[in-house]
Amino acid sequence: FPMPGETPTARLPSPWKDFLGEIDKALEKPLEIHCIGGFALVFYYGIPRTTGDIDYYTAVPGDLNLEEIAGHGSDLYRKYKIYLHRVTVATLPEEYEERLSEMASGQFERLRLLVPDPYDYILSKLQRAGLKDSDDALFLFRSRKLKSDILRQRYHRELRDYLTGPLEQHDETLERWIEIFESPG
């Protein structure tokens, strides 16, 4: 696993490498998958936990049925016991695509796995704001030595207007998280 703060260049372990390799071989044209779940946290950001799927926000181009190819219940799922899962309860900052980083670079011919920068990743967890989301956000904030003012700016400039539900609640969640992030220990 990469040390916090490093950008990993390590190859993906099996069964992930094999699962994604089969998807890659099945592709007729390049495909980008914007990974936002535990998979990206574990294999890109180095959070110490396990995951059984690859959560993604979007795929480009969007005309492939990834659920059929590699979703829960697909042949690939039955073979590897892992699957692709499109997350529908997430909102990313407006310009997140400009800040994506590639993981597993050079390991596949047509498939590119992209992950949001750590600020965008934290903000993507804000709307749902479950316990695991806040724990993940805390890990990213501290391990990457992030700055609260950048997180706040990006929230107000690129995310707040796109969130559903009471905005005051999201504002309070962000401020509560920042208080936790900045507390000692």
Image: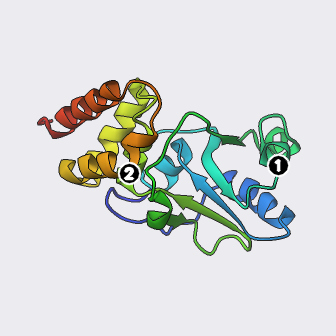
Q: Is residue 167 visible?
A: yes
The C terminus: image quadrant: top left
Of 2 and 41, nearer the camera is 41
Left or right, 59 with respect to 164, comes to right
Q: Which residue is mark 1?
A: 65
Of 117 and 104, nearer the camera is 117
Q: Is residue 92 above or below residue 117?
A: above
Q: Looking at the image, which residue is at 20% across and 32% down?
A: 180
Q: Secondary structure at mark 1?
A: loop
Q: Looking at the image, which residue is at 35% across and 29% down?
A: 167
Tell me which corner region of the image, top left, top right, bottom left or bottom right, holds residue 13: bottom right
Separation of residues labelled 1 and 2 (CA atoms): 29 Å
**Which residue is most to the left?**
184
Q: x, y percentage for residue 68?
A: 85, 43
Q: Which mark is residue 159?
A: none
Identity, as a three-letter code, of the amino acid under mark 1? Asn
Of callouts 1 and 2, which one flags the residue occurring earlier in the amino acid sequence?
Answer: 1
Which mark's residue is nearer the viewer, 1 or 2?
A: 2
Q: Which mark is residue 158?
A: 2
Q: Secondary structure at mark 2?
A: helix
Left or right, 28 with respect to 178, comes to right
Q: Looking at the image, which residue is at 22% across and 33% down?
A: 175
Identity, as a three-letter code, of the amino acid under mark 2? Glu
